[in-house]
Amino acid sequence: MGESKHDHSHAHAHTQTKAVLNRISRAIGHLTAVRNMVEEGRGCSEVLIQLAAVRSAIDGTCKVILIDHLEHCVADAMKTGDMEVLDELKQAVEMLIK
């Protein structure tokens, strides 16, 4: 897909852009369903199950992005000695896994 630049010096292609956008759309759909369910006064168990679907969709999106980042951005940065990419990845993982 398109080229993207970070604050550091390497450029890379995001190879999973379509998959990420599809997964984000799925998460939005699930979240919209949660809002509708709450507005309709649906049962808590049903809402919780739908929220689990939202979480699963988001987790799947994170996984696709992380794998793409490792395979392309991090691999390319290691070839050029760009250690800043590892620091950024560490920060992202810390925020992702709390």
Image: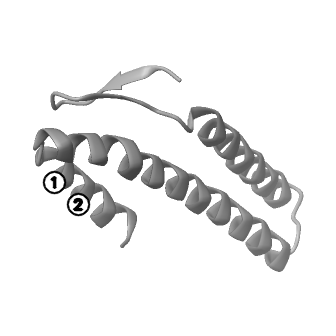
Would you name the residue on which mark 1 appears? 87
Apparent side of residue 15 relative to residue 26 in the rendered image (left or right): left
- Disc 1 packing (10 Å; few <14; some 14–19; many ≥20): few
Q: 45 or 7, which lies in front?
A: 7
In the picture, residue 10 is in which quadrant? top left
Q: In this view, does 56 lie above or below 49?
A: above
Apparent side of residue 54 relative to residue 20 in the rendered image (left or right): right
Instruction: Tell me what residue is drawn at x 83 percent, y 51 percent.
Output: 36
Would you name the residue on which mark 2 appears? 90
Q: Which mark is residue 65?
A: none
**Identity, as a three-letter code, of the amino acid under mark 2:** Lys
| x and y percentages locating residue 91 in the rendered image | 23, 57
- Give the distance between the C-alpha atoms of the residues marked 2 and 1, in whole angstroms: 5 Å
| x and y percentages locating residue 71 in the rendered image | 40, 49
Residue found at the far top of this picture: 2
Instruction: Tell me what residue is drawn at x 16 percent, y 27 percent.
Output: 9
Instruction: Tell me what residue is drawn at x 79 percent, y 76 percent.
Output: 44
Quadrant into which the C terminus falls: bottom left
**Identity, as a three-letter code, of the amino acid under mark 1:** Asp
Q: What element carries label 1?
A: helix
Instruction: Tell me what residue is drawn at x 27 percent, y 40 percent.
Output: 76
Residue found at the far front of this picture: 79
* Cβ atoms at labels 2 and 1 below 8 Å apart: yes
Q: 51 or 93, which lies in front?
A: 93
